[in-house]
Image (cartoon, helix red, strand yellow):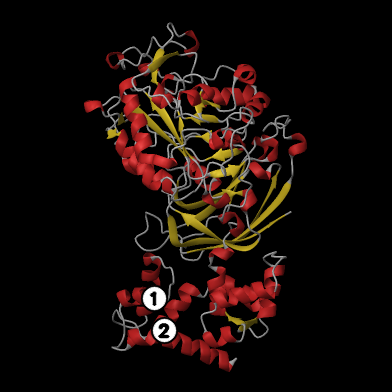
Amino acid sequence: KIFLNLMSHTWFWNIIQNDFKTGNIDFEGCMRLLEKMQINFDEDHLKHIFKKTIDKHSGDIISMDDFKAIYRALVHRPEFEELFKAYSMDGNILPNSQLLKFLAKEQFQTEANETTALEIIMKYEPIDEVRKKKQMSFEGFIRYMNSEECSIFKSQHKSVYQDMNQPLCDYFISSSHNTYLIADQLMGPSHLWGYTSALLKGCRCLEIDCWDGNNNEPIVYHGHTLTSKIPFRSVIRVIDKYAFMSSAYPLVLSLENHCSPKQQEVMAECLKSILGDKLLSTPIGGEVDMTRLPSPEALKFKVLVKNKKVGTLEQSLMRMDDDYRGEAEELSDSDFQSDDEDADDMMPLQRTRSPTKRKGDRKSSIPPQKKPKVKRTKIALVLSDLVVYTKSQKFVSFEHSQQHQQCYENNSIGESQARKLAKISAKEFISHTTRFITRIYPKGTRMSSSNYNPVEFWNVGCQMVALNFQTPGTQMELQDGKFLDNGGCGYVLKPAFLRDRNTTFTPRNVGAHSKPMSLSIRLISGHQLPPSGLSKTNKADPMVQIEIYGVPEDQARKKSSVIKSNALCPKWNETFSFNIQVPELAMIRFCVEDEVSLVSNEFLGQYTLPVTSLNTGYRNIPLLSKDGIKLESASLFAHIWYY
């Protein structure tokens, strides 16, 4: 014990002595030293601890002993100490064998062996002498408990682990709506950053609204609104640069195309010349398989164009060697999926698509089914032929699709219509999504770019549930949490019961597909939570909400008690139990709020993940800000258990 104390003292002394060479240090020096030791800290919390320390003597500088006290107050958490002492024979050292016992008994890591324990010691034990003896000190244990390995999110799910050889329609695909907007739908700026940030988040379906621009250069913006305009060419350049930075799997460009045939030819030329080999313009292997879509694996590093298409794939292939620039064909509205999203969901101000008649006649809006005249659209053959597996096809009815639709034809359905269909024809909806890629998009009246809850559409197997990535909130948190899974590659394999064409599953009648899970969460404590916006120091009155999103009978929300004026290290020690019928579709969200008054709370941080990605045992729960940025020093600590 004396040896260890000496070792730990010497280790600590060796790290800090240089900084104290010229005497005592101030707050800046204290921060620098903690950074050097790779300790995450929140400045407000550190200030508070620092101030408490210097209040004991005058002046605003600290000695080595003071620094040691600050370090301990910040790093030596009593809840970690309790666990460490339970497995350490002498309260100071954890031998390899005891660490292994901890992994098996507390973390439920049944496959752990001596090597596992040794690897942890080698990676996290900072004191050389202790590490050489294949042991772990409390310092090493703290570093391990705070590491990614002890995160609530399963490490195996941080890389691609699912079968990527199933047809495209068997996956949930991370999808963005009006990707070019970074604010609202009416006045906001259009910006290339919309594309960059979505791609860096692993988004695999981007939307591009294309309109005729000056000098024969197509532009991207939200038509008939005051949103700013960006050149189509610039958008494709950005996509070319970032397409496969976060994921190797196929990227779909969903074109909402309002261009004249002449500018559509410019679009096709841009796509070909800028994307080069990345652009998929012919079926893989030259063969057209009419019965089954290719897999994400087969389409790795390829960009697919989703647009209206003239005729069939075979006709496109027969045209391959011809030069047919300048040729266009007319399609009537009944031939293709009008991706004029605003036309759907009762957005009469754009019904006619003529700029003069924009906003005036809201009252005389015509319900979609009574369109007085069939709209005709001209499509350039060169652009049409770039569409291979993602042809936009008008959705008529599930029955119509069953009889006439090809596997490479996709539908886009507005959220309101989709919600009605999910309610009244869930079985048919699911049967449809086992065969065809279905994209859902927000209704046109969401002017402020608000989002809908994506879970209700994932529940019926919709692959592309498009959200406004620029709008923070619970809906986007569910989207981000869903696609943390499978290595964040933007493709998540749907559960078997949403891929089987003869499935009997529906969200309101899970029947035999129920695999009930009993989940128990002991919320132990929080650490360095963001202080309240109302606090001048480092205080908050935190409470935690634990929410389950999934099929209707799994929806649940439980609240912890409020801990008064403690954001640094609130302790709850409260247990919450959930019974989950369909874990494969369930998401869990931990949300930390500051109780401002009895009726209002301020958001402090949250973390959302799929229930099937939960780790068992003692786990740290990272927290993200409203904008989805990781709060480096803030976390919750909990014990997770399920069977």
Mark 1 nearby-residue class (10 Å; few <14, some 14–19, many ≥20): few
Residue 15 is labelled as 2
Residue position for label 1? 36
Based on the displayed image, in which of its 4 quarters is residue 456 positioned? top right
Q: Nearer the viewer, residue 377 or 159?
A: 377
Q: Amino acid at mark 1?
A: Lys
Distance of label 2 from label 1 (alpha carbons): 9 Å
Dot 1: element: helix
Residue 589 at least partly seen: no
Rendered-image quadrant of the N terminus: bottom right
Which quadrant of the rendered structure holds the C terminus?
bottom right
Give the image location of residue 263, x and y in percent. 31, 25
Q: Is residue 373 left or right of residue 587?
A: left
**Front position in the image: 311 or 356:** 311
**Taking the image as drawn, is residue 638 in sight?**
yes
The answer to the question of whether label 2 and label 1 lie on touching residues, with beta carbons closer than 8 A, is: yes
Q: Residues within 10 Å of mark 2 (few under 14, many from 20)?
A: few
